[in-house]
Amino acid sequence: MAKKSMIAREAKRQKMVLRFAAKRAELKRVIAAPASSDDERRAAMDKLKKLPRDSSPVRQRSRCALTGRSRGYYRKFGLSRTKLREQTMEGNIPGLRKASW
């Protein structure tokens, strides 16, 4: 199980990303637009730099829904490798079973 503080930090980042998503998208649109002048582009870049670091979606880390483990995460199931194996063995994941040959 991951530390509670790490799980809380990720939840905080998720909220921050959602809160600043529209503002970041608008600033990035101005920066990428070919019609923007150099001054507008520079001003948008400065505003983007001043936003909180945790508002960037790149800083988020995928975590297991059950344990909060960040390594060995399967995106399709939302679980870490250990919990995915346990749930599979219990038959809780439809269509997934242990391989045997």
Image (tube, grey):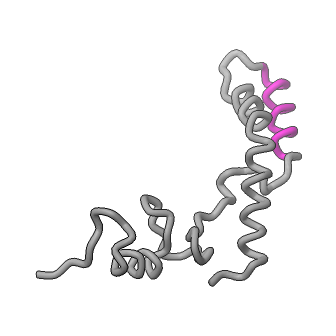
The answer to whether 36 is drawn above or below residue 81 in the figure is above
Question: Magenta span covers which residues?
Answer: 37-49
Q: Determine the residue located farthest toward the top in the rendered image.
A: 35
Question: Who is closer to the viewer here, 35 or 80?
Answer: 80
Please say if 56 is above or below 22: below
Decide: is 84 above or below 59. below
Residue 55 image offset from top left, x and y in percent: 77, 50
| Residue under the image location 80 percent in, 43 percent down | 19
**Can you say which quadrant of the picture contains the N terminus?**
bottom right
Name the quadrant containing residue 60: bottom right
Q: Along the horizontal axis of the image, is 6 left or right of 98?
A: right
Q: Position of residue 73 (x, y in %)?
A: 49, 70
* Residue lying at the far front of the rendered structure: 91
Residue 90 position, x and y percent, is 37, 79
- Tell me if 31 is positioned left or right of 39 in this view: left
The overriding secondary structure of the stretch rendered in magenta is: helix
Q: Residue at x 79, y 25 (%)?
A: 38
Residue 3 lies left or right of residue 86; in this view the side is: right
Q: Residue at x 71, y 33 (%)?
A: 25
- Give whichever of 58, 71 is nearer the camera: 71
Most extreme residue toward the left is 101
Residue 10 falls in image quadrant: bottom right
